[in-house]
Amino acid sequence: MNTLTLRPGADAEETFARSKPDYVDARVLAAGTEQTHTKPSGANFCLFSCDGDFYARPDATAAVPGGNVTDGSAAELNPTVWDVHNVTAIHLIAPADQVVTMTFYK
């Protein structure tokens, strides 16, 4: 598993290109069916991508909100990147069939 790094550009400026991935997992989500994805050993960061809307929640059941959630327990809609060093599993759900990829870095 590669380290997530920012590389210097030709003029020593920081670029925003990340290091190439060498650990990518994919989950095919059926509409309304929650899945639990165990974080790989040594992973510190997870970058998400999806072909549609999905919800994710670390270490707790994810649900598509059917109403207001005002106690802080809602799943996050379309997260981009998470620091997962203290996370055991990522819970995923989508309102329609979707494919989610998770790229992990140490």
Image: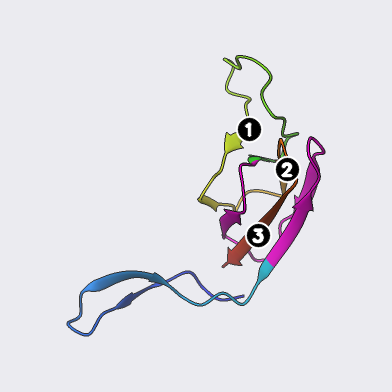
Residue 49 in the image, given as x and y percentages of width and height: 58, 56
Circle 2: residue type: His
Which residue is most to the left?
11
Q: Which residue is mark 2?
A: 91
Q: Quadrant of residue 25?
A: bottom right
In this picture, is 80 found above or below 66?
A: below
Tell me how far mark 3 sits from mark 2, CA to CA.
Answer: 13 Å
Judge by depth and name the residue closer to the eye, 106 or 47: 47
Q: Position of residue 20 (x, y in %)?
A: 51, 77
- Region of the chain picked out in magenta, as a range: 25-54
Q: Residue furthest bottom?
A: 10
Residue 66 visible at all? yes
Q: Nearer the viewer, residue 97 or 17?
A: 97
- Crowding at label 3, few (<14), some or many (≥20) Cα neighbours within 10 Å? some
Q: Quadrant of the N terminus?
A: bottom right
Q: Where is residue 88? Give x, y as percent.
A: 72, 50
Circle 3/circle 2 CB separation < 8 Å: no
- Give the amino acid at mark 1: Ala
Marks 1/3: CA–CA distance:
17 Å
Q: Which residue is mark 1?
A: 75
